[in-house]
Amino acid sequence: MAAAVASVQPGYGNTAPLQLEVDFGSLDIAQAASCLKTLIRSHFALGGTLMNINVVDERQILAASQDPEAYPDLIVRVTGFTAYFANLSPDFRKLVLERIVRQAS
């Protein structure tokens, strides 16, 4: 995916961002960091210019959708901006939730 997005970069100043929701599941933190580092370096080495990465697990976002105030520090990438999940409108929360759950399936 990183190679495909990097190959269509329209040039500096106008970018085609790579939007990722990453759930490392059972990987330990060192494995997760190594995988993410490789992905980021590969994308930029191939000519990519912008990445938006959410590192969140599906269970956490599902729980936060039920009780946003219990997750005041949960930061998510929306569509072109980053925000605290609890501060989003119900419509934006639903948008983020559906994207993350759909990609996890």
Image (spheres, grey):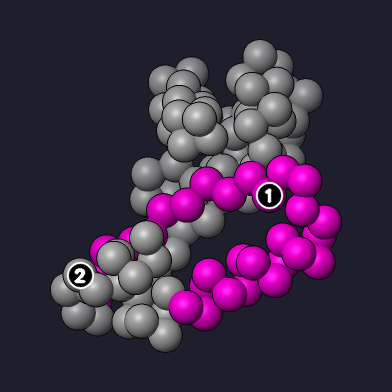
Task: Give the residue type that dot 1 points to.
Answer: Phe
First reached walking from the N terminus: tag 2 or tag 1: 2
| Cα–Cα span, label 2 and label 1 | 27 Å
* Tally of numbered tags: 2
Q: Assign a secondary structure to mark 2.
A: loop
Q: Is residue 89 magenta?
A: no
The residue pinned by badge 2 equals: 8
Q: Position of residue 79 (x, y in %)?
A: 37, 44
In the rendered image, the residue lying farthest to the top is 66
Q: What is the crowding at mark 2: few (fewer than 14 residues within 10 Å), some, or many (at least 20)?
A: few
| For residue 59, above or below residue 3 | above
- For the record, the magenta segment spans 13-42
Task: Give the residue type that dot 2 points to.
Answer: Val
Q: Is residue 87 left or right of residue 8?
A: right
Would you say residue 58 is visible in this rendering? yes
Residue drawn at x 64%, y 67% is 35
User: Which quadrant of the view contains residue 32?
Assistant: bottom right
Please tell me the numbered disc located at residue 24: 1
| For residue 41, above or below residue 65 | below
In the rendered image, the residue lying farthest to the left is 10
Tag 2 and tag 1, C-beta contact below 8 Å: no
Q: Is residue 33 magenta?
A: yes
> Of 26 and 59, which appears nearest the observer?
26
Q: Position of residue 26 (x, y in %)?
A: 77, 46
Residue drawn at x 62%, y 73% is 37
Residue drawn at x 47%, y 52% is 20
| For residue 56, above or below residue 33 | above
> Of 46 and 97, which appears nearest the observer?
46
Look at the image and tell me in which quarter the N terminus lies: bottom left
